[in-house]
Amino acid sequence: MAKKTYRFPHKHLLGIRGLSAEDIQYLLDVAETHIAKNRQQNKKKDSLKGRTVINLFFENSTRTRTSFELAGKRLSADVINMSATHSSIKKGETLIDTAMTLNAMHPDIICVRHPESGAVQLLSEKVNCAVVNAGDGTHEHPTQALLDALTIRMKRGPLKGQTVAICGDILHSRVARSNVALLTTMGAKVRLIGPPTLMPRFADALGGKVYHNMREGLKGCDIIMMLRLQTERMQGSFVPSIREYFHFYGLDAEKLSHAKSDALVMHPGPINRGVEISGELADDIQRSVILDQVEMGVAVRQAVLEVLVEGLDA
Ligand code: NCD
């Protein structure tokens, strides 16, 4: 159960970096309290009744936007979804003007996804409400790391001491950055596996041990997180061909056999079958917890909204 006495000391959730183990633990504890209710017929709670939540998405998204929307609605908030393609951003309005316009309508929380790293932080400095980073460029995606952590915790218990491999396009991945920060803070051991061209220059400084060989890197791992090749962020060619990429870095049953025999397979989605993961493995519910991650995503976002609203009232 969540410790009701804990006070989350941050106004916004802009990233995992900057959160303490206690902050993370608290968010996960609150999230866990939402899981059972979300499986019932009546999923409604009223902890955000009278509140306004704006989901402001400057980048296409299906699962994350839906997840934030459901989270807000299940807590009885008024939820507005704004997508950049339908807004005045296309008419040349700046990010700051958009933020100030929305701020004038007195929202309580704005959840923002933006293609530029740092844009969400910038926006948070211009508004009075709480801001949640729903993914900014290649920088952070904190609710994804939290939902990944909740999935691991529900399936395998505490994160401390578990060996987690994050594999693939580390260079362009905000999911990888947030996950490395969360996992190392919580005492898990992190490995980063991928081709040299998709590894940040100082990858080990992120806090993980770097491998370029999948079979070597997967040896003894408890959890394997696969990442999508983020082609929309690539300028130029980072892999010789998709076929060759799958051959060396795509997760299939053979490569998986090098990890622990009960290792779990995760992926933030959207998955590209036959690119970073084989279709059979993605569908194997004995090993893949990809849909559990989606389920935990709603509970985590409910927790984040609730905890930030508590902070606004304090
Ligand atoms: C991730 C993202 O957008 O960063 N997906 C997500 O949030 N569901 C990862 C990805 O796009 O590959």
Image (spheres, rainbow, N blue to C red):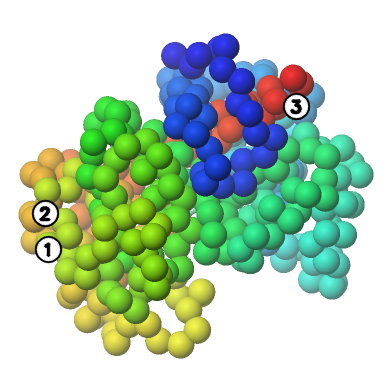
Disc 3 to disc 1, C-alpha distance: 48 Å
Q: Classify mark 1: residues with Cα within 10 Å, few (<14), some (14-19) or many (20+).
A: some
For label 3, the residue is: 312
Res. 60 image quadrant: bottom right
Lateral position of residue 147 relative to residue 135, left or right: left
Q: Which residue is nearer to you in this view: 272 or 152? A: 152
Image position, residue 83 (x, y; %):
71, 58
Q: Which residue is nearer to you in this view: 162 or 42? A: 162
For label 1, the residue is: 215
Label 3 SS: helix
Contact? badges 3 and 2 (CB < 8 Å): no
Residue 155 visible, this orientation: no
Image position, residue 187 (x, y; %):
32, 37
Amino acid type, mark 2: Lys
Amino acid type, mark 3: Leu
Tell me the quadrant of the picture where the N terminus can be found: top left
Disc 3 to disc 2, C-alpha distance: 46 Å
Residue 207 visible, this orientation: yes
Image position, residue 154 (x, y; %):
32, 29
Lateral position of residue 90 relative to residue 155, left or right: right
Lateral position of residue 120 relative to residue 91, left or right: left
For label 2, the residue is: 219
Label 1 SS: helix
Q: Is residue 168 above or below residue 164?
A: below
Disc 1 to disc 2, C-alpha distance: 6 Å
Q: Counting residues from the N terminus, which is met first, the one under dot 3 or under dot 1?
A: 1
